[in-house]
Image (cartoon, rainbow, N blue to C red):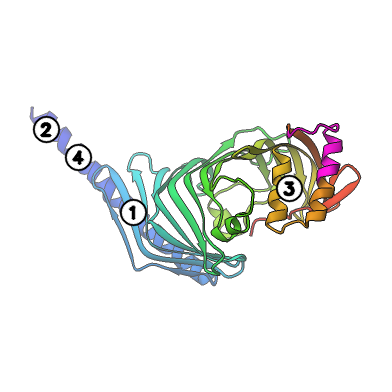
Amino acid sequence: MRILLAIVITLAAAWAGYWFIGSSALQSGLAAWFDARRAEGWVAEYSDLSVKGFPNRFDTTLSDLRLADPAAGLGWEAPFLQLLTLSYTPNHIIAVWPHEQRITGPGGAFTLASDDMRASVVADPNTTLALRRSTLTAEDVALTPDDGSGAISAGVLRLAVERLEDASATHQPRYHLGLLAQDVAPPAPVMALLEGDISLARVIDRIAADLTVDFDAPWDRYALEDARPQPTRIAVKSAGLHWGAMSLEASGALRVDIGGRPSGTLTVSARGWRQMLDIAAEAELLTRDLADTAERALAVMAGGNESDAALNIPLTFKGGRVWIGPIPIAPAPVLRLN
């Protein structure tokens, strides 16, 4: 009995020592990370850093956070951030965000509000912390710009990322990404432009995407500290939205060059495309004459069918532009991450 008691006491003391050493290392490691960012010219501030959860958890709370990378023009502020993990699986973290955060970027400054925004993050158990998989969930999300242009909101937001092992023929890191947003409300000023005779639901029922993306570098701790990985190939299994009687679905594959210019083809299936043209004209995105011309051209592509059946449109990306057949219709987006 004495031997058993001695073993139990020894194991308990060893575990307690492991927790205190681990919590101290975690606290000092995070403090050193903030010091390193400040040395690089970042704004990297917090008012308090604590680690609790003895004996089986490392529950870290950072208060009054401010992070900004002047070179990238990106910034983030929050009253707190919690990083929760079991002490025996420290590479699996649950991140919990506050109800309100501040984000700044090249597009301006925004307030991000949400209910219960949290993410599960699993990284490699080494110092690079390369991402294996992550799932983010949030409810009642609203992104409000400071310029007064109106908030965009979603009732449900889901984002999932998983690294695919040895899947890329080019041996570049490959990730499977999934996105789901439900009950998406466009900004009020946009909806105000559509108040005419168009019968349109106040919310977009669903926006979803299923993608596989190759990057030129892995998503790990250095992706935040140094340069962001850039996409080199995007395979779109499906991406689209459903808004009342209208829907858009896209699939295909794109290569992305070093300047972020895509090349390849996406096939877009549009249902309710006549109403889409009406909406674009009502919102003054197209003139009425141009919308009428586009309707006649698309009707020809649909074989002269007067119904509003689905229309399949191949969009070709080349030379920095988007093409339908031989006709360039728009500049291609530049796919670069700051």
In this view, which residue lies farthest toward the front?
197
Give the numbered dot on residue 60: 1
Residue 205 position, x and y percent, is: 54, 40
In whole angstroms, how far apart are the C-alphas of marks 3 and 4?
70 Å
Mark before the other along the chain sequence, 3 or 2: 2
Which quarter of the figure has residue 66?
bottom left
Label 2 Cα crowd, 10 Å radius (few <14 / some 14-19 / many 20+)? few
Residue closer to the observer: 184 or 178: 184
Residue 191: where, in percent of width, then height?
58, 55
Going from N to C along the chain, the mark reached first, 2 or 4, is 2
Single out the mark in the foreground, 3 or 4: 3
Identify the residue position indicated by label 4 in the image.
12
Instruction: Give the distance between the C-alpha atoms of the residues marked 1 and 2, in whole angstroms.
Output: 33 Å
Q: Residues within 10 Å of mark 3 (few under 14, many from 20)?
A: many
SS for dot 2: helix
Q: Is residue 190 left or right of residue 258?
A: left
Q: Which residue is mark 2?
A: 5
Coordinates of residue 13 in the picture (x, y in percent): 20, 43
- Real-space CA distance between mark 4 and mark 1, rounded to the nearest whole angstrom: 23 Å
What residue range appears in magenta?
295-308
Q: CA distance from mark 3 to mark 2?
A: 79 Å
- Up the image or down, 310 lies above or below 297; here it is above
Asked which secondary structure carries label 3, the reply is: helix
Query: Which residue: 31% across, 48% down?
Result: 58
